[in-house]
Image: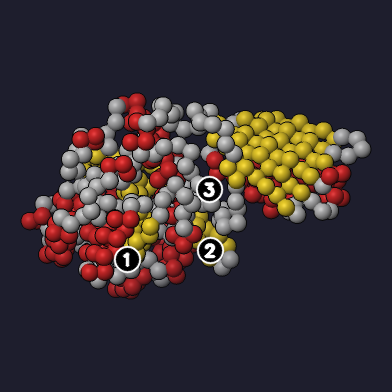
Amino acid sequence: MDLEAENVLTLVAERAQLAEGVEGVRSILLTMFRFPSLKNKKVSQKTGIAIPALAAVRGELVKAGIIEKKNYLGENGRTWICENLNLKFDYDPLPNNFNSSLTEIPEEFASINKVEEILSNRPEPDFALDQSHAISSTVINRALYLLKNGDVEGRKIVFLGDDDATSLAVGLLNLAEEIAVVDIDPNVVEFLSERANTLSLKNFRVISHDLREPCPTNILNQFDVVVMDPPYTNDGLRLFLKRAKQVLKTSIVIEDKEHKVIGKKCLLCFGNKPPEEMKLIQLSILDHGFIIKEMIPYFNIYKGASILGQFSHLYYLELTEPKSTEDTLSLKLNPIYTSEFKKHKEIPFRPIGFHFIGEMHFKNQKQLLKNENLHKIFIDSLNRADLIILDVYNHVYKPYGFSAVAILKTSHASIHTWPEHGYISIDIFICDELSKGLKVIKILKEQIQPSRSEFFYMERGIESSIEYKPVNFESEDT
């Protein structure tokens, strides 16, 4: 959808107080476009939006001049949807199911039949990167699944790793607004780039990048849909979920005001695990702000993937909260590939907590004499980062100097000043999301405005050597 349309639908969602946000409004319009005769109850069933909320949204769409009546698009509504949402199908493009065999693919999608020949020339899988090629029918079924769910037409789609070449299948549908692929393997990058060029796929780009390093800034907060088949370890999954959250669009600026965006989608392929490990997998999904909208067992079939049992499950995820950016951080502390785990001791699925330390230096020493102001900024930074404060202790030294320690529900935070040296030290330990600690120190830096500063963080409670990593906020966007 174009930016102006996204702005309009964002405001419609806010005025209707729709919890599902702009993506919920789009799903209502998509359903009305594909199924124009459906009544409220059926539209509610298809979108998952309660009837009162559905009615409120439709009322706002009428006020905005997008649809003619609450239950009727009208010609203007159909035109608006085609031009602004870039929807092509005013009917269900796959009325039976998404997993049609190759011989049952509708005529409209005949171009996707090229996939089988294209895939026969894929580079050999690199097992050190947990690669194992999905068979051609699986690749096609993924593309058709996205299409049936309304996640191809007019959408910006990013693939985090794509040795299966599913991006080419989606590109052949010629319905997406943009397709981007981020992959660590130079052979995959070269193959996808050459084939996309040969097929004359529009708005298709391939980026060579290791996702353990910070994401390129030009893909942050950009996409509607993420497709990924990550390493089959929980640490690998957590890394990819973190990057998925960063590249999905979670905020939009309308007339200089930032508005939150939720509801963007992630298609995740992940292998089967024993029950206790599957519990951790699902906790990781929830921990990163995603919910599982649908899970289809044994959807993906692979060639020779004995480590996976030759199949994996398909998860259809929805992002329910804005991103917490850690864009400038390198995340190489834990192994993420199966082969790496075999060379290491077993590592807990997540660190116990994160330790941040920082130093601020000031040319204006008088600035550090304002104890009440510093105390207020300190407490405000914790509250704004959604850290729960249980108790606070502070002390004013003679002739000058100030300390404040906050006991948090998830550990502690402290600030200490030395006005005579123009110096403040920060110490924070949280058993919470890394992003919350990052937000605290970023707010402190913005509000106190030191002449210079340094901040470091470390994961605590894992079997690794003590090593602090620098925090660099130069290109971070929270």
Residue visible at 79% across and 51% down in the picture: 362
Residue carrying label 1:
204
Q: Find numbered disc 2 in the image and state the secondary structure of the residue it sits on.
A: strand
Residue carrying label 2:
253
Which corner quadrant holds the N terminus? bottom left
Q: Find numbered disc 3 in the image and state the secondary structure of the residue it sits on.
A: loop
Residue visible at 50% across and 47% down in the picture: 330
Percent across and percent down for residue 394 are 79, 33
- Amino acid under label 1? Phe
- Left or right: residue 384 versus residue 272 is right
Cα separation between marks 1 and 2: 26 Å
Is residue 352 among the parts visible in the rendering?
Answer: no
Where residue 284 sits, quadrant-wise, is top left
Residue carrying label 3:
329
Callouts 2 and 3 close, C-beta under 8 Å: no
| N-term-proximal mark, 1 vs 3 | 1
- Left or right: residue 114 versus residue 259 is left
Cα separation between marks 1 and 3: 27 Å
Percent across and percent down for residue 221 are 46, 57
